[in-house]
Amino acid sequence: MLDSLSLSSSLTLFFIMLIASGLSGLLFLHPRVPLSFVRIHIGIVSLPPLVALFALINASVNGNVGPWYVDSLAWLMVFFVLAIGLIIQRFSVRYLMGDRSYRKYFMLFTFTTGVASITWLSGDIRLMVISWGATLIGLTFLIRLNRGWKVADEAAKVSARLFTLSWFSLLIAMIWLFVVTGQWQLSLALTNEHLAQLGQWERTGINLLIVLAVIIPAAQWPFHRWLIESVVAPTPVSAIMHAGLVNAGGIMLTRLSPLFNGDIASIVLLILASISILIGSGISLVQVDYKRQLVGSTIGQMGFMLVQCALGAYIAAIIHLVLHGLFKATLFLLAGSAVRRYEVSSRINERSAYLWVLAGRTLALLVGVAFWLTAPGDGYQLISALILGWSLSVSWTQLVAFGQGRIGRIAGLIFLGGSAIIYFIIHNLFYEWLHTTVFQGVQPPMFVVIIVVGLLLIGSTIGSWASRNRSSVSYSVLYLWLIRLGEAKTKSIESHPNYLKQLFLSQGGNK
């Protein structure tokens, strides 16, 4: 009884604070409200994530409270989305000062993060679908914030079309689930008793619709185009888009995980995500525009997250999306300082560096094989071993092998060791929070996992070969193909000076 009261009290307090944030955003829209009110608005917006953090720390039970389902995962995602949103809004106070959409930006931003948090608290399928649709609408309007600029308007149209396809796919899947199980309550519809009513073709059909609904907002191939077009959005909008919204697919698959049992839908997701990893990594390497590099990185990282979901490693996927969100939001907010590209110092001894690189790759191979041998029949362990070995090799190369002198390499080793310790602490903390609330899914057949691993290794081999044969025709073809994949459509390309000139003329200026 006390636990139910505690859940109900936390939800009541949270929604009071969330409504206050929304009203604050609407009030700021009024032109008579001074711009200095934005400071008060930021203070009000900080209250919902504080309540969510308090509820997460004190979460001891899971349960339904009316149309809401409350557990550690729900509060973690609510806190994450709202906290990231708070940081970005605080950054935007001065960053967007003087923009003619300044007031509208804070209202739309507060609305979008607010309804996104409602999505992850929803225990009723209908409420979840409606809230997610409202989130996609809010994101579309944020992309279209500078609607006078035809490039932004075109990017919003591209995004809206794909978001509509994604939302209707989720809607049909959830209605189909209700028709078979007779339950709108998500926790009841996903019980073994009700899932047993699903035939194999019905389960596969629902799963394929969910996969389609997930890969579009995650910008996975062949639906990655909208994220490339969206680089015209203001940088803070890109930050929340890449940090808190494109990774929603991992959360949604985790919530619906009892449906997935290693069937054809999981295999399709695994293959599409693997292709997206290669394409996203390639785009990030060939683009010279900083924001497009980050777009390519996000496509690849979301591919890794969805691979983890397809393999049933939902806790790992949640950790990945949270850490990626923090990392990517930081990179976007620091985009203005990315003036010069990093160059390796010419003072580095190439022979010595090569020996250190070789040592790092040997260590990475040993660590990866040792990790895999702990569970040789586990597909998730195989993928994890590959990712762990590759990450260690890249990190060692950048931090240790290319370190300047003995001091630089020692500093790199310390940083690498410290990062590993921090990661294991975070991993254990998240596991403690989520292991009782997150379903451990069934993995696809081992031969599919091996095919995916082979695909990733072939892609890595091609990339290594291309970097060493830059004068070849094959390299040129690959390079130009990746450039084309990472470029927006012709309609979505226009210089900022033209936009500013049109704005100046519309206000009565002269050429």
Image: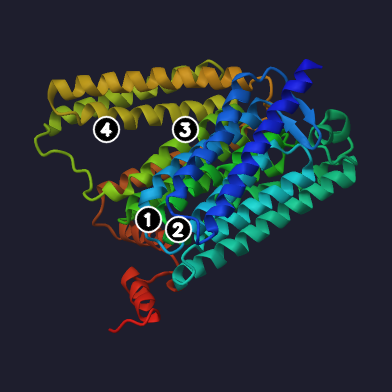
Label 2: state its secondary structure. Answer: helix
Camera-side mark, 2 or 4: 2
Q: Is residue 269 visible?
A: no
Q: Which residue is mark 1?
A: 97
Q: Give the mark nearer the N terminus: 3 vs 2.
A: 2
Secondary structure under tag 4 reads helix
Quarter of the image for residue 60 reads top right
How far apart marks 4 and 3 lie (CA) works out to 20 Å
Earlier sequence position, callout 2 versus callout 4: 2
Task: Name the side, left or right, on which 163 lies relative to 486.
Answer: right
Q: Which residue is mark 2?
A: 102
- Looking at the figure, which quarter contains the N terminus? top right
Locate residue 280, reporting x and y percent. 44, 49
Marked residue nearer the N-terminal end (1 or 4): 1
Q: Residue at x 48, y 43 (%)?
A: 40
Q: Position of residue 356 (x, y in %)?
A: 22, 25
Q: Is residue 78 above or below residue 225?
A: above
Q: Are marks 3 and 2 in contact (CB under 8 Å)?
A: no
Q: Nearer the viewer, mark 3 or mark 2?
A: 2
**Between 77 and 438, the one nearer to me in the picture:** 77
Q: CA distance from mark 2 to mark 4?
A: 40 Å
Q: Determine the secondary structure under disc 1.
A: loop
Q: Earlier in the sequence, mark 4 or mark 3?
A: 3
Query: Would you name the residue on which mark 3 appears?
Result: 323
Q: Earlier in the sequence, mark 2 or mark 1?
A: 1
Q: CA distance from mark 3 to mark 2?
A: 29 Å
Q: Amino acid at mark 1?
A: Met
- Read off the residue under disc 4: 398
First in sequence, mark 1 or 3: give its number.
1
Which one is closest to the eye, mark 1 or mark 3?
Answer: 1
Q: Give the residue type that dot 3 points to.
A: Leu
